[in-house]
Image (tube, rainbow, N blue to C red):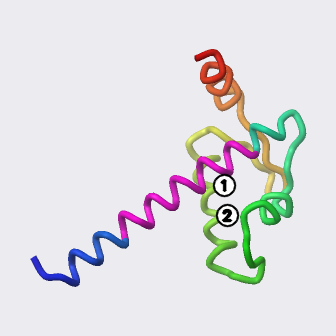
Amino acid sequence: MCLHRIRRRRRRASAAGDERELHRRVLDLVLEAHPESLVFDDLGAAFLADPADLAEVIALAVAVRDLVVVGLLRSDGLRVLPTRAALHYRCLEERR
C-alpha cells in the first residue's frame, strides 16, 4: 500500500476520534448544566480556543447537530438541553 494512503487513513481515524471526543465533551457539559439550558455562546466559550476559527465553530455545530439527530440533545437553534434518554443514561452510569 502506498505511504500517502496510509497517512490519509491515519488522518481520517484521528479526525473521527477527535469528533467522538468532542461529542462526549459536549454531552457531558450539557448534562452537567442540567436542569439549566446552555446557549451556543456557552458552548463556544467552553470549547473554542479561537471563536473566529470557522473550522472550530463548524465542528462544534456539527457535534451538537449529531447529538440532536441521535436523540441525546434537544435544540431550538439557540439553547441546548439533554433529552430524557441522555438523562436516563447518565443515571444508569452514576449507579455503577
Which is nearer the eye, 69 or 11?
11
Q: Residue at x 68, y 51 (%)?
A: 26
Q: Are marks 2 and 1 in contact (CB under 8 Å)?
A: yes
Q: Tell me the distance, in whole angstroms, between the alpha carbons under discs 2 and 1.
A: 5 Å
Give how far across and how far down residue 9 sits, in percent. Answer: 28, 70
- Residue 58, position in %: x, y? 64, 72
Q: Position of residue 13 (x, y in %)?
A: 36, 63
Observer-nearest residue: 85 or 51? 51
Instruction: Indicate the quadrant containing the C terminus: top left, top right, bottom left or bottom right.
Output: top right
Task: Say the numbered circle drawn on residue 61.
Answer: 2
Magenta stretch holds residue 96:
no
Secondary structure mostly seen in magenta is helix
Residue located beneath label 1 in the image: 64
Amino acid type shown at disc 1 = Val
Residue nearest the observer in this picture, 70 or 35: 35
Span of residues in magenta: 12-29
What amino acid type is highlighted by mark number 2? Ala
Dot 1: within a 10 Å radius of its alpha carbon, few (fewer than 14), some, or many (20 or more) residues?
Answer: many
Is residue 7 shown above or below 75? below
The answer to whether 68 is drawn above or below residue 39 in the figure is above
Left/right of residue 42 with respect to residue 13 in the rendered view: right
